[in-house]
């Protein structure tokens, strides 16, 4: 019978760790290594588990999204829990106000 080990130390394990580029992260998804069921995101090259959301969290995200939607200046949009790609990350922030449109 296999036993799952859990590490309680906030320090990294004493093993070499690999940071991933955004392209490598996408490739892991394309190859099926990472699936939509894997609740992860890429932060500064590290693949990290996303935090669980509780109903109150969802309520406030929705409320704030609506509030911002009615107040952002022209040329900006509100993105709610959607990935944003940067040079070394692809976070999925609760709310982001970005320039451009939905087609950008």
Image (spheres, rainbow, N blue to C red):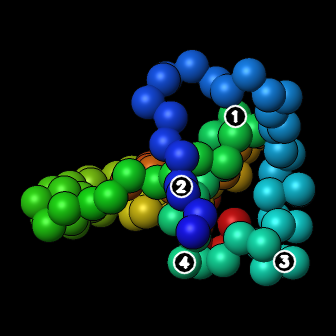
Q: Which mark is residue 30?
A: 3
Q: Nearer the viewer, residue 46 or 9?
A: 9
- The quarter of the image holding the C terminus is bottom right
Q: Which residue is mark 4?
A: 37
Judge whether 40 appears above or below 35 on screen: above
What is the spatial separation of the Cα atoms under label 2 and label 4, in whole angstroms?
20 Å
Please tell me which of labels 2 and 4 falls first in the chain. 2
Q: Quadrant of residue 31?
A: bottom right
Residue located 85% across and 28% down the image: 16
What is the spatial separation of the Cα atoms under label 4 and label 3, in whole angstroms?
14 Å
Residue 25 in percent (x, y) is at 80, 57
Q: Which residue is mark 2?
A: 4
Please tell me which of labels 1 and 3 falls first in the chain. 3
Q: Which one is closest to the eye, mark 2 or mark 1?
A: 2
Q: Are marks 2 and 4 in contact (CB under 8 Å)?
A: no
Local SS, label 2? loop
What is the spatial separation of the Cα atoms under label 4 and label 1, in whole angstroms?
21 Å
Judge whether 48 appears above or below 52 on screen: above
Q: Nearer the viewer, residue 27 or 9?
A: 9
Q: Which residue is mark 1?
A: 44
Q: Which mark is residue 54?
A: none
Residue 41 in percent (x, y) is at 60, 54
What is the spatial separation of the Cα atoms under label 1 and label 3, in whole angstroms?
20 Å
Residues packed near mark 1 inside 10 Å, few (<14), some (14 to 19) or many (20 plus): some
Q: Nearer the viewer, residue 88 or 68?
A: 88
What is the spatial separation of the Cα atoms under label 2 and label 1, in whole angstroms?
27 Å
């Amino acid at each position: 019978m296999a036993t799952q080990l859990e590490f309680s130390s906030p320090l990294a394990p004493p093993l070499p760790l690999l940071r991933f580029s955004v392209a490598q992260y996408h490739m892991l998804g394309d190859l099926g290594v990472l699936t939509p069921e894997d609740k992860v995101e890429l932060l500064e090259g590290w693949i990290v588990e996303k935090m669980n959301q509780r109903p109150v969290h969802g309520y406030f995200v929705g409320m704030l999204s609506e509030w911002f939607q009615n107040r952002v200046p022209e040329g900006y949009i509100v993105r709610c829990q959607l990935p944003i790609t940067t040079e070394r990350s692809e976070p999925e922030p609760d709310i982001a106000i970005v320039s451009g449109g939905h087609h950008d």
